[in-house]
């Protein structure tokens, strides 16, 4: 039985490799998101983007989005000291011919989904100038809460990339769902 389990694991590893190649995923991490992990990813991305000879503007945007997304998981992933999901998440970078996608996923409480959807939909409905005003207003007046934050990171990502925030929720159980956020950074500067 142990041999069969090993073979299934090897098949899983190979299938994961194939899926990553098919989807142009350059980097994947699953686990606790810490300041050290964030520093390691930005260093890896810096080397990769330099090798690709990306413009400094694109590099800055990719770094900025990476840091905002990783901080979002680190600060806002739902945690109750006994949950297996505590401060854990998944982080991926996809490289397409016209853009980079920074994809994150983390567990949130189901009771927060409507507020998150409302915030993200509101951000996605705004023009560049409206996002700038929204950001300044949130900086001045935004109510920061332990779980919700002021949404500044999401607003800033939309402002910096000029792209809509793509999101999806997958229900895990009655209490939790998995929140997937995809942020595109166009390769043109």
Image (spheres, rainbow, N blue to C red):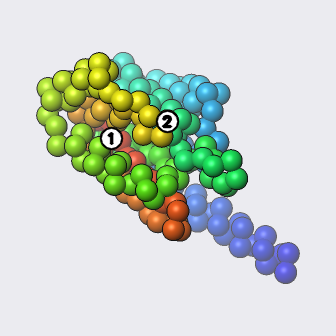
From the image, tell me which residue sits under label 1: 184
The image quadrant that residue 153 belongs to is top left
- How many marks are shown on the rendered structure? 2
Q: Which residue is drawn at 48% across and 40% down?
A: 147
- Whether residue 9 is visible to the viewer of this picture, yes or no, is yes
Q: Is mark 1 on a helix, strand or loop?
A: strand
Residue 21 is situated, as x and y percent measured from the top left of the image, at 49, 55
Q: Quadrant of the C terminus?
A: top left
41 over 29 or under it: above or below: above
Residue 55 is situated, as x and y percent measured from the top left of the image, at 34, 22
**Cα–Cα gap, marks 1 and 2:** 27 Å
Closer to viewer: mark 1 or mark 2: 2
From the image, tell me which residue sits under label 2: 146
Q: In which quarter of the image is the N terminus?
A: bottom right
Q: Nearer the viewer, residue 186 or 149?
A: 149
Q: Which residue is drawn at 17% across and 43% down?
A: 125
Q: Do the residues labelled 1 and 2 touch (CB within 8 Å)?
A: no
Q: Which residue is drawn at 49% across and 55% down?
A: 109
User: Is tag 1's residue or tag 2's residue first in the polypeptide sequence?
Assistant: 2
Q: Nearer the viewer, residue 166 or 112?
A: 112
Residue 74 placement, left or right of 102? right
Q: Which residue is drawn at 85% across and 75% down?
A: 2
- Please give the label number shown on residue 149: none
126 over 35 or under it: above or below: below
Q: What element carries label 2?
A: loop
Residue 155 is situated, as x and y percent measured from the top left of the image, at 30, 32
């Amino acid at each position: 039985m142990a041999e069969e389990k090993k073979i299934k694991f090897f098949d899983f590893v190979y299938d994961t490799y194939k899926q990553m190649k098919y989807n142009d995923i350059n980097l994947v991490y699953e686990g606790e998101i810490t300041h050290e992990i964030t520093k390691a990813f930005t260093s890896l991305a810096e080397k990769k983007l330099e090798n690709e000879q990306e413009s400094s503007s694109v590099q800055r945007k990719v770094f900025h989005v990476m840091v905002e997304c990783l901080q979002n998981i680190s600060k806002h992933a739902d945690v109750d000291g006994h949950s297996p999901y505590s401060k854990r998440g998944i982080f991926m970078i996809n490289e397409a011919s016209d853009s980079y996608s920074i994809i994150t996923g983390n567990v949130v409480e189901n009771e927060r989904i409507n507020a998150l959807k409302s915030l993200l939909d509101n951000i996605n409905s705004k023009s560049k100038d409206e996002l700038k005003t929204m950001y300044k207003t949130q900086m001045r007046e935004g109510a920061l809460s332990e779980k919700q934050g002021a949404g500044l990171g999401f607003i800033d990502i939309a402002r910096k990339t000029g792209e809509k925030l793509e999101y999806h929720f997958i229900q895990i159980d009655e209490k939790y769902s998995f929140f997937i956020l995809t942020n595109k950074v166009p390769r043109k500067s």
